Image: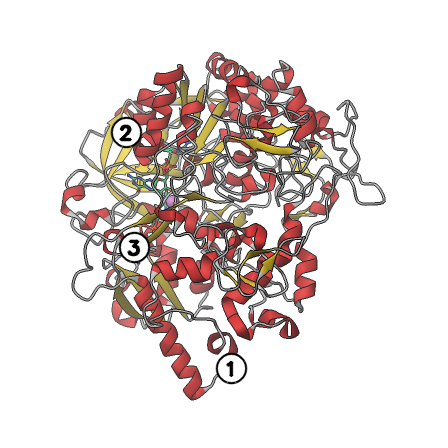
Amino acid sequence: MASLAARFGRGAMTNSWNDIKNADLVFVMGGNPAENHPCGFKWAIKARQERGAKIISVDVRYHRTAAVADMFVQIRPGSDIAFMGGLINYVIQNKKYDEEYIKHFTNATYIVKDTYNFDPTVGLFSGYDPEKRKYDTKLWDYERDEKGMVKKDMTMEHPRCVFQLLKQFYSRYTPEVVEKITGVPKEKFLEVAKLVAETGVPDKSMTHLYALGWTHHSWGTQVIGSMAILQLLLGNIGVPGGGVNALRGHANIQGMTDLAGEGRFLHGYLKPPTPEQQTLKDYIEANTPKPWDEGSMNYWSNYSKFIVSLLKSYFGDNATPENDFCYSYLPKQDKVISWDEAVDRMFRGKMEGVVSIGVNLLANTPNAKKTAVALSNLKWMVVMDPFETEMAAFWQHVENPESIKTEVFLLPSAVFAEKEGTKTNSARTLKWQYKAVEPPGEAKEELWFIGNLYMKLKELYQKEGGAFPDPILKARWPFQNPYHPTAEEVLALEINGVALDDIKDDKGNVVVKKGERLPGFIYLKDDGTTSCGMWLYCGVFPQSGNRAKSADLTDPSGLGIYPNYGYSWPANRRILYNRASAGPDGNPRSPKKKLVWWNAKEQKWVGYDVPDIKPDLPPEYGPFIMLPEGRGRLYSQFLVDGPFPEHYEPYESPVENVLHPKTPHNPVVKVYRSDLDLLGTPDKFPYAATTYRVTEHFHYWTKHIYGTSVLFQKMFVEIPEELAKELGIKEGEKVRIVTARGSAEAYALPTKRIKPLTVNGKKVYTVGIPIHWGFEGIVRGSLANLTTPFVWDPNSQTPEFKGFLCRIEKVKT
Ligand SMILES: Nc1nc2c(c(=O)[nH]1)N[C@H]1C(S)=C(S)[C@@H](COP(=O)(O)OP(=O)(O)OC[C@H]3O[C@@H](n4cnc5c(=O)[nH]c(N)nc54)[C@H](O)[C@@H]3O)O[C@H]1N2
Ligand SMILES: Nc1nc2c(c(=O)[nH]1)N[C@H]1C(S)=C(S)[C@@H](COP(=O)(O)OP(=O)(O)OC[C@H]3O[C@@H](n4cnc5c(=O)[nH]c(N)nc54)[C@H](O)[C@@H]3O)O[C@H]1N2
Ligand SMILES: [Mo]
């Protein structure tokens, strides 16, 4: 998500599931949607059936997506940026980019300061501090005038304009270099490049679908950014059938990120305060950007309205202008406690307790041995889950369990069919889910546990006091039964929000009456007269009713917009940045891809979708309204590891980095001290390894259920046939996958689906490890994460699950 926010301004699927049917080319790289998103993948098949779209799958192995693709390309794990760099270079060298689009809608014309540079022989950008292993990203800023506006060259010929820097940067990624790094023969690469480049015209669009095959790398944010660059060059963002589409994982993972499920954000992607920001004014100033371009709508200029409405939602009547709306109650963080940081702190004995709701940390985190030690250093742990998971039962499976002092509380949670509420899908659409059955036995929905926990804490603070009782005692808790809030109450009263006074327009007319639910975030105020727990969801539950419950199947435009099916954030918009489907003059760029346009007579934006721009703002304004530039970023100064994506090898790699052997992997990769000794080299661990899912299981919990367990009972490992032969391993034999962290036992599955590749003259084998088994449930096997490295992407804090080293040993029986 970090990567799309850095390039486009918002971190979410740009288009929608249904919109995939409008594509001329479906490019799948970094995911296996036929197996992991089978319901959504039908739209790709529809695109082919209805409009003759082609489907390309680029993956490290052949699977069910590859089986239905028009073209399958096998690459080496962890070589994706080289492939993408090759595509960018091809599009630029062959002038297949959409010139009008990049001139007006991207930062191609912006001039970068001469303190930015990149040394291709060493593989480092300017500003690298080898001691701290950090870049000084300030050196990568644009040139600006006295008012802070960026200097531009509309001819795009200035040697330091973004377009020229981009062209020069990727000129190294020739088809020959792509072949050397990825193992994809040059001819095959060029076949793909040709198809991709054909979509660089307004009449055509390519959609890109990805998931973990791209995020699970030490440069995951950058590889997604490379696709953002390619799609901007081709003019494929903001148009039907285009976009960079993150096919998200769990049914409600989008909702989780939207609603502060990650330490990096408060609700609605607002920033957590830092220790320097002592007052609300400091905080708002630090987070409210000024525009960098005359044509920038700069939507984040509304920041103060979102945070004040959020504080009103947190603290109700207790939040007043006089007390800074209780801003002082918010914790100030000097460091974000991300997943990696949390586990490492537990490992070092720096964390007292953990509350886990629907997470199996022992199964899902790299280097399970480290996680087991981390959990055994806790004093207490609460696991809210329908099953006894590996995490809850970890202590039964370590040496000397009697020495472990961690007290574990297992709270039996209801599952999806046993409760109601919304889910937000990858396409940002909130949909209501109804309850089918009562939870069995003592199982309860989370809102019951949380309501009771809150009321008990409040009682204890009231009785006994404590270091800082105010945030608990003064929280707003507007529910009929405070011990058991309902999901609909939370959505209506907290998340959507209400008018606390009459809301008036510029002319003084009342547009929302006091006490009514808000119809949308444009009504939010920073004076304390509105309360809203998540600005992006404001409008889902207006006075007229719960729009997440709407299931109207009409689609007037035929584009798959379905405006009254659920509610899509922001403002029920289905395709983000859709203003870019019209040209700089506001007219549709192509009759075939017509979406929204400027009605000159009425002086406003109109169209099939909700226009992604203020309706009366003239066409001079750029489509990327969440960025201070108003333009999409081919060059982004906000990522910690460089403004352009560069090929680095995974931390553990079977080959040297042919571009710059001195800087083989991401120079700012996140690795903790205690893990440095646990990293393997190809002399001991010669094979490239990767991990993935099988469609028959959902992670670690379907093994508790008979019906799904029988489909895949045993942990297996996919080994190229040639390698199996070399090692004398037969199908069904038990083998050990050994890495520098530890080993996992599995049954060998020699396969034709993964071929050996020739990488820079060297034969490289890829071994594939599925992730589902563990020591709990009906079917059991090794945890795949006993093998994976504790190595993290420094932008998104995501582990490198998809590119490491292993060897294979036979298990003597
Ligand atoms: N049935 C089922 N569906 C699921 C899930 C499940 O457990 N079961 N999990 C859900 C969740 S939470 C998520 S996040 C999504 C994940 O969805 P996907 O990302 O599709 O999941 P994976 O199978 O982990 O990995 C996708 C593909 O990446 C490939 N791959 C591995 N390494 C590389 C590499 O270096 N480069 C490239 N290009 N490809 C590589 C793998 O071969 C695999 O085919 O699925 C969701 N859907
Ligand atoms: N090596 C490797 N590791 C990986 C991955 C990989 O590709 N390779 N993928 C990673 C990814 S993308 C993900 S998302 C994680 C998945 O890791 P997890 O999310 O931890 O795995 P799950 O088993 O899907 O879900 C965790 C628990 O949620 C419980 N649960 C289900 N429904 C409910 C509910 O309604 N309420 C509550 N309270 N609990 C519920 C389940 O019983 C389960 O025990 O794994 C990560 N780990
Ligand atoms: Mo996931």
Asked whether 520 or 291 is in front, the reply is 520
Going by the numbered disc 3, the residue's amino acid type is Glu
Please name the residue shown 41% across and 79% down the image.
Answer: 458
Instruction: From the image, tell me which residue sits under label 1.
Output: 467
Tag 2: residue type?
Leu
Q: Percent x, y for residue 213?
A: 42, 35
Query: Badge 1: few (under 14), some or many (20 or more) residues near its Cα, within 10 Å?
Result: few
Quadrant assignment for the C terminus = top left
| Upstream in sequence: badge 2 or badge 1 | 1
Colour scheme shown = secondary structure
* Front position among marks 1 and 3: 3
Alpha-carbon span between mark 1 and mark 3: 36 Å
Q: Quadrant of residue 478?
A: bottom left
Q: Is residue 387 above or below residue 771?
A: below
- Name the residue: 19% across, 51% down: 704
Image quadrant of residue 589?
top right
Label 1's element?
loop
Residue 63 appears anywhere in the view: no
Measure how far apart labels 3 and 2 are at the Cα level: 53 Å
Q: Label 2 vs label 1: CA separation?
A: 63 Å
Mark 2 residue crowding within 10 angstroms, few (<14) / some (14–19) / many (20+):
few
**Lower sequence index among marks 1 and 3:** 3
Label 3: which secondary element: loop
Q: Is mark 2 within 8 Å of ligand 1?
A: no
* Kind of element beneath mark 2: helix
Residue that mark 3 sits on: 420
Q: Nearer the viewer, residue 809 or 165?
A: 165
Residue hosting label 2: 727
Q: Nearer the viewer, residue 500 or 416?
A: 500
125 left or right of 266 in image? right
